Amino acid sequence: MDHIADFDVAAGARIVYVRPVPLTEIPEEIRDRVGHIDHMYALHNVNGERLALVRDREMAFVLARQNEITAVSVH
């Protein structure tokens, strides 16, 4: 995606949760831009707020590391 993430994580809680999101749960304007995939990955803060959507799981963890945040998988 082409948006810069603002990782507004709680002070001292430098963690985000990564979970797969079916395309049916993603806004239509984003679905139209992602091509032929069945899901994306969302990064959420400790309050459950969605911070970012990325194309694959690896990218989600890289994005977290680049922002000095620990990423944890949620199933």
Image: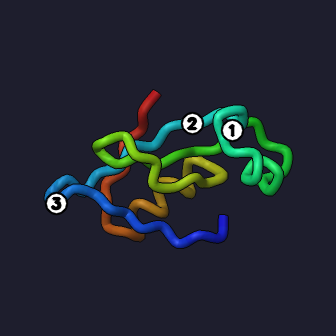
Q: Badge 3: how crowded within 10 Å, few (<14), some, or many (20+)?
A: few
Q: The residue under label 3 is which amino acid type?
A: Ala
36 left or right, relative to 62: right
Residue drawn at (30%, 42%), measured in percent from left and top? 47
Describe the element under mark 3 as helix, strand or loop.
loop
Label 3 to label 2: alpha-carbon separation: 26 Å
Residue drawn at (85%, 45%), measured in percent from left and top? 36
- Front residue of 38 and 62: 38
Residue drawn at (46%, 48%), measured in percent from left and top? 50
Whether residues under marks 3 and 1 lie with C-beta atoms below 8 angstroms apart, the answer is: no
- Of badges 3 and 1, the one in the foreground is 3
Q: Earlier in the sequence, mark 1 or mark 2?
A: 2
Q: Position of residue 67 (x, y in %)?
A: 37, 69
Report the residue marked by disc 1. 39
Whether residues under marks 1 and 2 lie with C-beta atoms below 8 angstroms apart, the answer is: yes
Report the residue marked by disc 2. 20
Q: Badge 2: how crowded within 10 Å, few (<14), some, or many (20+)?
A: some
Q: Earlier in the sequence, mark 3 or mark 1?
A: 3
Q: Position of residue 26 (x, y in %)?
A: 66, 41
Furthest toward the left, the residue is 12
Label 1 to label 2: alpha-carbon separation: 6 Å
Q: The residue under label 1 is which amino acid type?
A: His
Report the residue marked by disc 3. 11
- Front residue of 57 and 48: 48
Q: The residue under label 2 is which amino acid type?
A: Pro
Q: Which mark is residue 14?
A: none
Q: Position of residue 4 (x, y in %)?
A: 53, 72
Q: Position of residue 68 (x, y in %)?
A: 31, 67
Describe the element under mark 2 as helix, strand or loop.
strand
- Answer above or below: position of 62 versus 29: below
- Of badges 3 and 2, the one in the foreground is 3
